[in-house]
Amino acid sequence: MAESAPAPDDMRHGFQYGVPAEGGIPALEVRHLSQTFERGSANEVHALIDVSLTLAAGDFVTVVGMNGSGKSTLLNLVAGAFPPDSGTIKLDGVDVTKQDEHRRARHVGRVFQDPLK
């Protein structure tokens, strides 16, 4: 059974979940991920600030939050839709932070809320 992640007031800032299995390589390891959109403008948005997450193979996690809390940004960064401002993303111990989305697609699958859009 998967653990429930703590629900801080602002999940975008300093959120950490998971501990690597002793001696094992995590299936997904996100470290200190940050993402800001429209930096330097009046519309600047800090979507993620220092987010860390570690998942073992077979873990089941639900990402829940209010609109604008960074859920889609986190998943888009893991999938490689765009590069993070800072931090690293590892899949099975391999750093894929700078890897193109089409290369990550063989390791990361997503199901959208409305798959017909």
Image (spheres, rainbow, N blue to C red):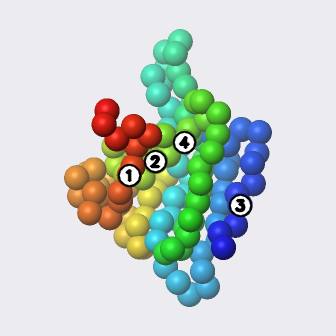
Q: Badges 2 and 4: C-beta atoms under 8 Å apart?
A: yes
At horizontal 48% and vertical 24% (from top left) the residue drawn is 39
**Closest to the observer: 105 or 1?**
1
Q: Which residue is mark 3?
A: 4
* Tag 2: amino acid: Leu
Residue that badge 2 annotates: 75
Q: Dot 2 lies on which element?
A: helix
Per the image, the residue denoted by label 1 is 110
Question: What's the amino acid at mark 1?
Answer: Arg
* Secondary structure category for the residue under label 4: helix
Q: Callout 2 environment at 10 Å: few (<14), some (14 to 19), or many (20+)?
A: some
Label 2 – label 3 distance at C-alpha: 18 Å
Task: Indicate the position of residue 44 as horizontal and vertical percent values.
Answer: 53, 21
- Residue 102 seen from this side: yes
Answer with mark 3 or mark 4, whichever residue precedes in sequence: 3
Dot label at residue 85? none
Q: Nearer the viewer, residue 59 or 33?
A: 59
Quadrant where the C terminus lies?
Answer: top left
User: Tags 2 and 1 in contact by the CB under 8 Å rule?
Assistant: yes
Which of the two discs, 2 and 1, labels the residue nearer the N terminus? Answer: 2
On residue 71, the disc is 4
